[in-house]
Amino acid sequence: QVQLAESGGGLVQAGDSLTLSCAVSGRTLSSVFMGWFRQAPGAEREFVGYISWSGTSTYYGDSVKGRFTISRDDAKNTVFLQMLSLKPEDTAVYYCAATLFMKGPITAAGGYDYWGQGTQVTVSS
């Protein structure tokens, strides 16, 4: 089993930065493939990005590419989502997700087995 707990959400203004954390328990980061997703009211869950088992490979959705960065601290077993130049359209509940095995498209929610409870990010204009 893998347990995930996000933190760091909040209310910010457009142009501000925010870093979300996802604390992982039950497995070390080297054994899980981690993703970040977000969901705005009335919208489907959207892929934000992922970081590979080794931590050396990352990939981002088009809407956040160049502004968001995923990193991790193996000693703390924590994954981070650094968000720069935030826009009102970034407002959503942000979730971290994990899978132990590749079983589907890794940019889709169905590719992950474990989810955190989510943390709200609100960007005011």
Image (cartoon, helix red, strand yellow):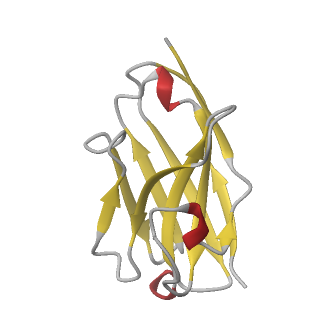
Seen in the picture, residue 70 relative to 105 is either above or below; the reply is: above
Residue 62 left/right relative to 45: left
Tell me the quarter of the image containing the N terminus: bottom right
Instruction: Give the answer, above or below, for where 12 lies relative to 79.
Output: above
Q: Is residue 111 above or below residue 53?
A: above
Where on the picture, by quarter, is residue 50? Answer: bottom left
How far across and down, in percent of the image, does residue 14 sit?
43, 18
Q: Residue at x 31, y 39 (%)?
A: 67
Identified at 54% across, 85% down, the residue is 28
Residue 24 left/right relative to 35: right
Hey, which quadrant is residue 98 in on the image? Answer: bottom right
Q: Please tell me which residue lies in front, 17 or 96.
A: 96
Residue 56 location (% of width, % of height): 28, 75
Number of numbered discs on residues = 0
Q: Residue 99 at x, y = what percent?
A: 57, 78
Seen at 67% across and 72% down, the residue is: 114
Q: Position of residue 119 (x, y in %)?
A: 67, 45
Q: Residue furthest top?
A: 125
Q: Residue at x 41, y 47 (%)?
A: 82
Whether residue 118 sits left or right of residue 123 in the image: it is right
